Image (cartoon, rainbow, N blue to C red):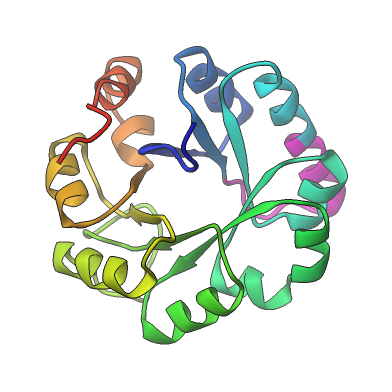
Amino acid sequence: MPYPDRFYPVVDSLAWVERLTKLGVGTIQLRVKELDDSQALQIVSDALAITKGTQAKLVVNDYWRAAIVAGAQYLHLGQEDLADADLGAIREAGLKLGISTHDDAELETALAAKPDYVALGPIFFTTLKSMRFEPQGIPKITEWKQRIGTIPLVAIGGIKFEHAAEIFAAGADSIAVVSDVTQNPDPDARVRQWLGLPAEAA
């Protein structure tokens, strides 16, 4: 199975992890903010228990210590978290690492860490979190992909299913989705739409 999968939902609760796992989603990122170490370890352990024995790969956002202790295999770091993380310990634990980028300097920082994928965002305007970066737009996907070569590129930020073909055509290997699933009136149907994408949708 590819990592990350072409459809890559990002959610903030164990309930969502369980729901997406049951729907057959291959890569799920758990992004919960403002947890202390014990809370982070608990939720990461619980999420791993949900996905154990399924096809779902759980990506832990931010909490690299919890990911190591709980035995996770996948980790995603933003730039601030990357600056504070122990990359040696992360690699020693065998974690695959994805890193967020928003501009040239952040891409350089990310590539220096030898990530397993690079995320670029926000592609479109997003209301989910206040961003100090303007929307990147689809042409930036092509530019970033040319620069990172064989490293998988994940596009994120304001993306809906209707944008998928254009974004894959621009060079993205994967699309990370938040509100198009979690705020959708029929999330299960939307997930099935994403999962029904042809393997080489373009």
Q: Considering only vertical position in the picture, is 77 above or below 182? A: below
Visible in this render: residue 46? Answer: yes
Horizontal and vertical percent position of residue 199? 27, 30
Residue extent of the magenta highlight: 31-44
Judged left or right of residue 19, residue 126 is: left
In the foreground, 2 or 73:
2
Q: Considering only vertical position in the picture, is 33 above or below 28? A: below
Residue lying at 21% horizontally and 59% vertically, measured from the top left:
124
Task: Say which quarter of the image contains residue 141.
Answer: bottom left
Q: Considering only vertical position in the picture, is 127 above or below 115? A: above
Q: Residue furthest front?
A: 150
- Asked if residue 61 is among those painted magenta in the image, a careful observer would answer no
In the foreground, 165 or 14:
165
Residue lying at 22% horizontally and 27% vertically, measured from the top left:
198
Tag count: 0
Judged left or right of residue 58, residue 93 is: right
Residue lying at 24% horizontally and 47% vertically, measured from the top left:
159
Horizontal and vertical percent position of residue 63? 72, 54
Visible in this render: residue 86? Answer: no
Quarter in which the C terminus is drawn: top left
Residue lying at 58% horizontally and 70% vertically, measured from the top left:
114
Judged left or right of residue 166, residue 94 is: right
Q: Residue furthest bottom?
A: 105
Task: Say which quarter of the image contains residue 162.
Answer: top left
In the foreground, 6 or 162:
6
In the foreground, 102 or 2:
2
- Asked if residue 33 is among those painted magenta in the image, a careful observer would answer yes
Horizontal and vertical percent position of residue 186? 28, 18
Horizontal and vertical percent position of residue 178? 38, 41
